[in-house]
Image (spheres, helix red, strand yellow):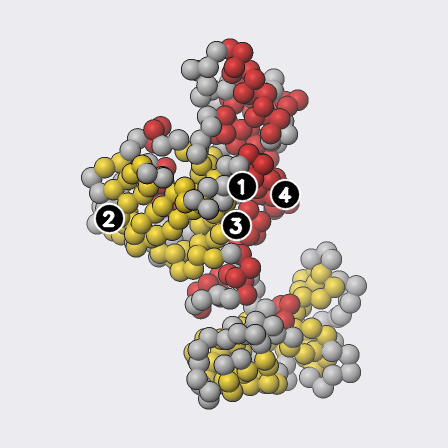
Amino acid sequence: MQALLEIKNIECRYREQIVVSGLSLHINEGSLACLLGPSGCGKTTALRAIAGFEPISQGEIRMGDVSLSRPGFTLAPEKRRLGMVFQDYALFPHMTVGDNVGFALRHQSGRQRRETVERMLKLVGLSDLVARYPHELSGGQQQRVALARALAAQPRAILMDEPFSNLDVDTRERLSLEVRDILKNAGITGILVTHHQDEAFALGDQVGVMSQGRILQWDTPFNLYHEPQNRFVADFIGQGVFIPGTMLSRDTVKTELGVLQGDRAYDCPPGAPVELLLRPDDIVPEPGGQLQARIVQKAFKGAETLYTLELPTGTQLLSLLPSHLDHAIGEQVAIRADVHHLVTFPR
């Protein structure tokens, strides 16, 4: 598959402060990529550099054979064939939905513009709202109008800067899946910036976890969760706790939960003290088992309940169990560790 966008070792500065450093990635045609990280990690600056709103002081940004940015040169944003969807939607309040979507199509004839608007609104599922005004729409509908407007200009790629952050949790999760379907059906490459892991995982084929201006791991959502390459990614992605252990072999570690074996571990020599990451789905009930834990907290999540468990040693674990297994705080439960992916780091 051909790379549409190539970002090669770029650096961005605000005055003398380095905000993005040594950032490299490539995004294939039709792929959806996400930059994920905490506030201040440089992800929005990287997106703005791709859009042409920020210059770069090192490296290069290319789209196919065209250089978009390099030190001393920044191709104007309107010449990059990139659509932009902002956090605040940026819709014109005095224009109807149809006029908002058709705003960038002034070069088309009236008939062409109407056909394009109809096609874009059908694509985002808003055909019946063409005559409405933005204030008459929900937040999710406004965001889909903003997406339709960006797609109407036939961009090579869509850039989205925290596009769902103003929405409630349920709408955010639903809309991220809808946007993924819309972009995939249109064959459009997309780049999303977010600090919400659920959004990144729902939308992205590839996700880059960023910290202090660098990408620490560029991978699939599955690999980021099950095979984090460093402690920051392991802490930032998902929930879990670290417990001490000792490596017995490359795929076996001794812990207070017993000797655990998985299909992979990092290269720690036998006898090395390590920390083992245990996710909530690694701790499962074991009726009649010897290992007992006391429930100290519980959080009902609908189909599942997240329990905080305490071992006799004081070590705390997390366990995600079906909610019909309604255990009380203070109750003792028998558990075991069912670890398929050994994630260990030197202790």
Residue plotted at (63% across, 81% down): 311
Q: CA distance from mark 4 to mark 2?
A: 38 Å
Give the labeled residue for mark 3. Answer: 205
Comes first in the chain, label 4 or label 3: 4
Residue plotted at (62% across, 26% down): 122
Give the labeled residue for mark 4. Answer: 174
Q: Amino acid at mark 3?
A: Asp
| Secondary structure state at the residue bearing disc 1 | loop
| Secondary structure state at the residue bearing disc 4 | helix
Residue furthest to the bottom in view is 271
Callout 4 environment at 10 Å: few (<14), some (14 to 19), or many (20+)? few
Comes first in the chain, label 1 or label 3: 1
Q: Quadrant of residue 181?
A: top right
Give the labeled residue for mark 1. Answer: 164
Residue plotted at (46% across, 46% down): 1
Residue 175 visible to an observer of this rendering: no
Comes first in the chain, label 4 or label 1: 1
Q: Quadrant of residue 77?
A: top left
Residue 65 visible to an observer of this rendering: yes
Comes first in the chain, label 4 or label 2: 2
| Secondary structure state at the residue bearing disc 3 | loop
Give the labeled residue for mark 2. Answer: 58
Q: Is residue 113 left or right of residue 19?
A: right
Are the residues tagged 4 and 2 within 8 Å (C-beta)? Answer: no
Q: Amino acid at mark 2?
A: Gln
Comes first in the chain, label 3 or label 2: 2
Comes first in the chain, label 2 or label 1: 2
Depth check, mark 4 against mark 1: the one in front is 4
